[in-house]
Amino acid sequence: MKILFATSNENKVAEASMLLVESGHVVEQLLVGGVPLKFDEPKELGIKAVARSKMSQALFLLAQEGIKEVAVMVEDSGVFLDAFDEWPGSESADVEAEIGLEGVLSLLEGEMSRGAEYRAVALVSDGNSTWSAEGICRGIIAESAKGEGGFGYDPIFIPDEGDGRTFGEWEEGKYTGITHRAKAMNSLVELLKAPSR
């Protein structure tokens, strides 16, 4: 199946492509006029609602553009800090842009819990059926940012399934199987293999 991933993040497209290609799926970035889609995101409702909203918008656009015989993929993810209730969650990118990773680290100084998790929600739809999967990667927030790899909160996130380094310190691609997004994508692969598909 050809899947168009509605995202502006090429790193996400590359990761999804690598994970889904072995199951016979081709993943490409969804571009309209050479430009990724811009979404209206109801961030106050959480990552699941954001993903569902993105899917509705993407399917509407495909219908408008007359694009057929493809499936569309959307994903939303965020970092959730144990010290705060469901935060920053769907607002992770906004928080990083506003206060930076150093600002996030400063919020956790002292006795604050450093536990955290990345969560992802991924949806695939062919216009008739929609498949949904979630992935979680537990870890802790480091005392300081380390590494230049990855993106977002990767330089301050140490995964429980790792070797004590932040995702930012891992060589590109080495951590793919344990990320929140990889877990969601791998679940999607299993769903898409189901006999009804």
Image: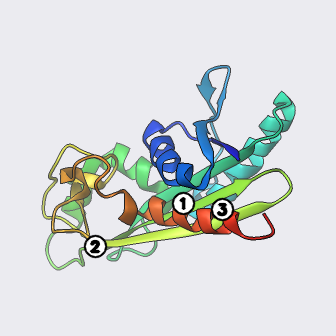
Mark 3 or mark 1: which is in front?
1
Separation of marks 3 and 1 at Cα, in angstroms: 18 Å
Q: Which residue is mark 1?
A: 185
Identify which residue, 138 or 3, lies in the foreground: 3
- Where 18 falls versus 197 (above or below)? above
Mark 2 element type: loop
Q: In the image shown, does 116 or 126 lie closer to the viewer?
A: 126
Q: Residue at x 70, y 58 (%)?
A: 52
Which disc, if any, is residue 161?
2
Q: Is residue 89 left or right of residue 172?
A: right
Q: Looking at the image, how many numbered discs can be counted on the residues? A: 3
Residue 166: give x, y in percent of width and height: 20, 59
Q: Disc 1 marks which amino acid?
A: Met
Residue density around tag 2, few if under 14, some if 14–19, many if 20 or more, within 10 Å: few
- First-in-chain label (2 vs 1): 2
Query: Pointers 3 and 1 in contact (CB under 8 A)?
Result: no
On-image quarter of the C terminus: bottom right
Crowd tier of the residue under label 3, counting other residues whose Cα lies within 10 Å: few below 14, some 14–19, many 20 or above: some
Of mark 3 and mark 1, the one earlier in the sequence is: 3
Which x, y percent locates residue 21? 55, 48
Q: Quick check: marks 2 and 3 in contact, CB under 8 Å?
A: no
Location of residue 186 in the rendering, given as x and y in whole percent from the top left corner? 53, 64
Contact between marks 2 and 1 (CB within 8 A): the answer is no
User: Is residue 11 toward the left or the right of residue 58 in the image?
Assistant: left
**Quarter of the view holding residue 106:** bottom left
Disc 1 on helix, strand or loop?
helix
